[in-house]
Image (cartoon, grey):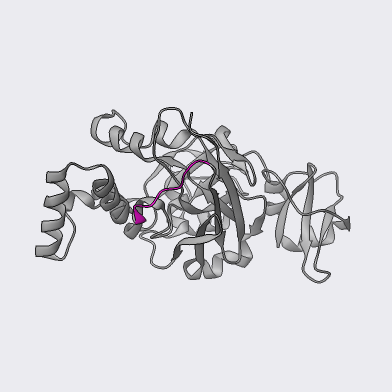
Amino acid sequence: MKLGLSGGHPVAFDEHRCMWRRIDDPRTRDIPALLGAGPEMVSSLLGSVGEPPAGLPFPPGSFRAFGLWEAHMIGGAKGMVSRFGSAPLRALAKTYETVTSSVLPAMRPRRNYYRFPQYYMGNHRSLIANGDEVPWPLFSEVLDFELEIGVVISQQVRDCTPDEGLAAIGGFCVVNDWTARDTQWDDIRHGTFGGVVKAKTFASAMSPVVVTADEILPRFTQLSGRVRVNGEVWCEGTTAVPAHGLGAAIAYAAMGETLYPGDLLSTGTLPGCSGLERCRFPKPGDEVRLEIDGIGALANRIGRRR
């Protein structure tokens, strides 16, 4: 079932009547609570005809961004060196890969990536909605998109098992984890906390529709997505072969801390679905549209460079 907000009022898509309908029960006005109630309960609350969702489906209480696909982590590292590395570093990387048929060890994720589902804390207050303009950060010259899946928590969990983590998922949406790549490269080399500080916290985007977990969880590793820039397909990817499962990711996030209904987690970028991996970056005025089959779409236009 698809859920969202229309004019600040919850709506759900009625598959039988092929229309959006208002949810009129005053006791369940927020989307995370409806996700926790389940599709059958929501179906019993459907009322009059409504408009399609617009804006953020809910204000997330927190935002954690994972990196579940090793192929993206390696592809992103290669892209960083290709775009920003010195000539000697680029030559070394190319020669090593030619001789060994593998990337430089430094381009692979560090040891803890394989031990735990790694994540960073994003800025949940900088999430923008479908159709909003992406503000170009004044400290960056290279802006990039990342096609990710948002995971919405609908049940409170703490120190949970992976199975309990899966049971805490209420729904899925589309997330664009916008990144200032030149700032990220500088922080990776010189920063105290790595490349996820100012490079990541100025803006992320979230689709207006949330799809209930029952529709996505059984086929999470079989989804496909793509990125269109000004209507042209720039990249395509799938969710196959993540390094860690969603249950393990939630269990790690909830280790020693509590996840609450309305907390948002993103999976990390689908392999190949960032400009960095293609060494092709959008420009001011470009419209970037992300699509995940079965979940939805998210489009934003990039603002002018300041």
* Residue 273 higher or lower than 284, as above or below: below
Magenta stretch mostly in which secondary structure? loop
Q: Which residues are magenta?
A: 278-284
- Asked where in the image residue 58 lies, by quadrant, the reply is top right
Residue in the picture at 55% in, 34% down: 126
* Most distant residue in the right direction: 48
Q: Left or right: 140 with respect to 296?
A: left
Q: Left or right: 206 with respect to 95?
A: right
Residue in the picture at 42% in, 68% down: 240
Instruction: Using the rendered image of the protein, determine whether residue 109 is visible from the camera's viewpoint.
Output: no
Residue in the picture at 11% in, 57% down: 96
Front residue of 247/121: it is 121
Instruction: Estimate the x, y position of residue 235 in percent, counting from the top left.
Output: 44, 61
- Asked where in the image residue 239 lies, by quadrant, the reply is bottom left
The answer to whether residue 117 is magenta is no
Instruction: Estimate the x, y position of residue 208 in percent, counting from the top left.
Output: 67, 50
Instruction: Estimate the x, y position of residue 254 in percent, counting from the top left.
Output: 47, 44
* Residue 266 higher or lower than 188, as above or below: below
